[in-house]
Amino acid sequence: AQTVTQSQPEMSVQEAETVTLSCTYDTSENNYYLFWYKQPPSRQMILVIRQEAYKQQNATENRFSVNFQKAAKSFSLKISDSQLGDTAMYFCAFEETSGSRLTFGEGTQLTVNP
Amino acid sequence: NAGVTQTPKFRILKIGQSMTLQCTQDMNHNYMYWYRQDPGMGLKLIYYSVGAGITDKGEVPNGYNVSRSTTEDFPLRLELAAPSQTSVYFCASSLTFRTSGETQYFGPGTRLLVL
């Protein structure tokens, strides 16, 4: 079974600075998808960024980028120029290509301080 | 498009009571899902459906039932509520498994408290 581990329960960063959230996963699959979701206090789950395992290039979405290390099974999220609105719980998630079932990590609570 | 909508937003149940959590999507998605999120935890899949009339169990199906009579609706039924079912419930949908990696769209969640 696939597992996803986020080892940082809480993190904080000053506004305008850069922060990196860690995620590791375990799978025997070769092709899969990885995601970062954001859950603000409103509790809505919002997709931040997606990475396809067969692509070597790291995904980027504006201020959000990932460092995908397939051999190490690591998938970290970098947030540049942090904004107060980035304060949220961030979940790393894994999806095998044979289906459409997401496995989530435990989450990292990120607080951006003014 | 309203996306994925869930009702109610919050509910308190007594032990042994029953209720149905409603979920509707207007994106014509084939796949729909129910997750639960316990405090400080990630989401766990309860049930999912690949299309009208087809449902299957996820990781934590015990104590729940689902049905999928239409593409739009995917209600989750709790028959005998227990305190262990206190959680936040999220419904989600996606287009189709053939485009695996397709974004899942989440509803706003239903907070359930069983006392």
Image: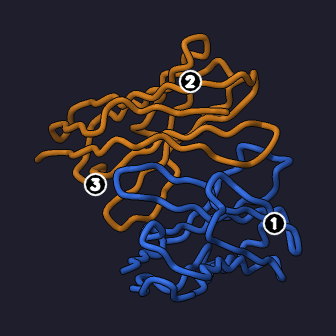
Chain colours: A orange, B blue
Camera-side residue of A19 and B47: B47
Assess whether mark 3 and mark 2 are in contact (beta carbons under 8 angstroms). no
Name the mark on residue B95: none
Name the residue furthest left: A114
Marks 1/2 same chain? no
Camera-side residue of B41 and B9: B41
Alpha-carbon span between mark 2 and mark 3: 24 Å
User: Badge 2, how many Cα within 10 Å: few under 14, some, many 20+?
Assistant: some
Answer with left or right where residue B79 lies relative to residue A74.
right
Alpha-carbon span between mark 1 and mark 3: 37 Å
Secondary structure state at the residue bearing disc 3 = helix
State the residue at coordinates (59%, 24%). A26
User: Badge 1, how many Cα within 10 Å: few under 14, some, many 20+?
Assistant: some
Give, as a three-letter code, the residue at label 1. Answer: Thr
Above or below — where is A76 with respect to B104? above
Give residue A4's position: percent from left, percent from top.
53, 33
Give the quadrant of the C terminus of chain B. bottom left
Q: Which residue is mark 1?
A: B55
Give residue B57's position: percent from left, percent from top.
74, 59
Marks 2/3 same chain? yes
Give, as a three-letter code, the residue at label 2. Answer: Asn
State the residue at coordinates (31%, 63%). A41
State the residue at coordinates (19%, 36%). A13
Q: Chain of mark 3?
A: A
Depth-wise, is mark 1 or mark 2 nearer the camera? 1
Q: Which residue is mark 2?
A: A58
Answer with left or right where residue A81 lies relative to residue B81.
left
Secondary structure state at the residue bearing disc 2 = loop
Q: Which residue is mark 3?
A: A85
| Residue A90 found in image quarter | top left
